[in-house]
Amino acid sequence: QVQVVESGGGLVQPGGSLRLSCVASGSPFGLNVVGWYRQAPGKERELVATVSPSGTSLYVDSVKGRFTMSRGTHALSLQMNRLKPDDTAVYYCLVLGNGTSYWGQGTQVTVSS
């Protein structure tokens, strides 16, 4: 059974930093950890960062220059710097395996003074 676990969220003041981690396990078919999404209260889930087929990290404009994604074997991290209140959301990791999408439970990031 595939498991996706996100961690690292918390409460931080504007301008602060957090590092999120995602680890996937449990598939005999191989897993592809493809990116980070977030969902703010009352809004739809949106893409934050993803890995292109060539392995390049791609970011939405609102986080460019502030967020950096790193990829490991069945793992993904997201270093978030200069956080803003608009970054407040539950952050999710997307994992693909054998044609199926898997999501974790998410990790809450709250940016507030």
Image (spheres, grey):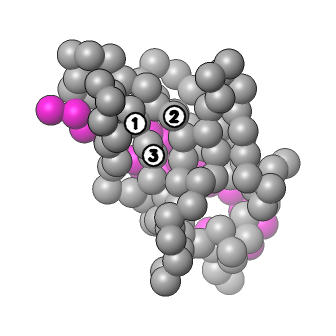
Q: Position of residue 26 (x, y in %)?
A: 21, 26
Q: Is residue 113 left or right of residue 44?
A: right
The magenta segment is 1-22
Q: Of callouts 1 and 2, which one flags the residue occurring earlier in the amino acid sequence?
A: 2
Q: Dot 2, how many residues are within 10 Å of its Cα: few (below 14), some (14-19), or many (20+)?
A: many
Q: Tag 1, which secondary structure?
A: strand
Residue at which label 2 appears: 34
* Residue found farthest to the right: 65
Residue at 71% across / 26% down in the picture? 56
Which picture quadrant has residue 49?
top right
Residue at which label 1 appears: 95
Mark 1 to mark 2 CA distance (whole Å):
6 Å
Mark 1 to mark 3 CA distance (whole Å):
7 Å
Q: Tag 2, which secondary structure?
A: strand
Count every numbered label the image shows and give the total: 3
- Asked whether residue 9 appears in the rendered view, the answer is no
The vertical placement of 52 against 16, above or below, is above
Mark 2 vs mark 3: give the one in front.
Answer: 2
- The amino acid type found where label 1 is placed reads Val
Residue at which label 3 appears: 93
Confirm or deny contact between disc 1 and disc 3 (CB under 8 A): yes
Residue at 23% across / 23% down in the picture? 27
Confirm or deny contact between disc 1 and disc 2 (CB under 8 A): yes
Q: Does the magenta run of residues contain 2?
A: yes
